[in-house]
Image (cartoon, helix red, strand yellow):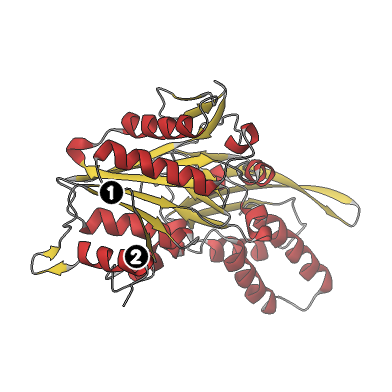
Amino acid sequence: MVIPSSLKNCFQLFYVLKISAAGFKYTANRGLILQSVSSDVYQNLAVEDWIHDNMNLENRQVLFLWRNSPTVVIGRHQNPWQECNLKIMRKKNIKLARRRSGGGTVYHDLGNINFTFFTSKKKYERMENLKLVVRALKGLRPQLDVRATDRYDLLLDGNFKISGTAAKLGRTVAYHHCTLLCSADRFILSSVLKSPYKGIKSNATPSMPALVKNLFEEDPTLTCEMVMDAVAAEYARCHQIDHRITLINPADEIVFPGINNKTKELQTWEWIYGKTPKFSISTCFNMVYEQSLLEVKVDIHVKHGRIEVCNIDLPEQWLPPAMCNELEKNLIGSKFCPSETTALASALLRICPQNYELHSKWSLLCENVMTLM
């Protein structure tokens, strides 16, 4: 019987990751090159977590290749309201993910390749990884002007950023991951990586804006598959391992026991939004009601993604103070998000007096408050 090569790869990976009495045992000689068959960001980030938590990388290294459907990925210590346009993302059904590593916010789609280099903490070396990617690209197209910077970015033509870097250093294990903009939708990228929210005060890590360009704008004959294969080949050459890319399914509990729990955690509101460092929004907005222009001042403090202080300053007598106080009181403790505020406002409206004018004013106020979220 002839066993297909893809199935052989699965058998090899199962052997590599087999369970021993002492836990997970990694037995490949010097390294492994993995590529995800999934374009789900939460599944792919879970693979990083799983390898970090379960593989013995003391004398071995792993390269993980992965791509995602449209997603904005923020760093571990970042504020999504400060970093991206959540309104556009909701409208276009673009996912938001928070990774375990630090660094800035990036946009992923299938025109972006992600490389994750796993090593022991002692062998962790970001610049060497970036130089490896540069060599692979120049091996494909020697005329490409691509270089690594002191900030651990990759620049095209000396000016355009095509790759950003982030890392996580554990007690004994480390990983460095980087993006590579190949043919990403730059219009969407620029739209979603621009926050519309004003008046935010936060100690969260800010992203550093940069001019970006797609690699394939320089050479349209390239493909993501060609680039991934070239990087894998250069990685194999450097580490003297077999140039074989093992395809993996990040949802496979047989190969990666417990990985689906990691995926679920990365999708939770508590992780994506609740891990945001404490911040406040002090701003004002204008409302038009019956041809009158009204200025409303708002001061909201958010901790663990939930409102802990809420002050709404309305023009005198525009709305009964008791109604405004009720809104402020009920917002405290709630998630700082439009869906929860909508449900809360609707519930409060049902117990308000049956008065059309009050209901109209209430709805207008709540709609405007939600624009801050």
Name the spot of residue 347 as percent of width and height, x first.
63, 76
Q: CA distance from mark 2 to mark 1?
A: 30 Å
- Residue 131's image quarter? top left
- Residue 367's image quarter? bottom right
The residue at the point 15 percent across, 61 percent down is 25
Say above or below: 359 vs 193.
below
Q: Earlier in the sequence, mark 2 or mark 1?
A: 1
- Residue 166's image quarter? top left
Q: Pick whichever, 294 or 169, lies toward us.
A: 169
Q: Residue lying furthest front in this view?
A: 1
The crowding category of the residue bearing disc 2, from other C-alpha atoms within 10 Å (few below 14, some 14 to 19, many at least 20), is some
Quadrant location of the C terminus? bottom right
Say above or below: 4 vs 195.
below
Quadrant location of the N terminus? bottom left
For mark 1, give the secondary structure: loop
For mark 2, give the secondary structure: helix
Where residue 202 is drawn, which disc sits there? none
Where residue 262 is drawn, which disc sits there? 2
Residue labelled with disc 1: 242
Q: Pick whichever, 187 or 3, lies toward us.
A: 3
Name the spot of residue 132 as percent of width and height, x first.
37, 33
The residue at the point 54 percent across, 30 percent down is 161
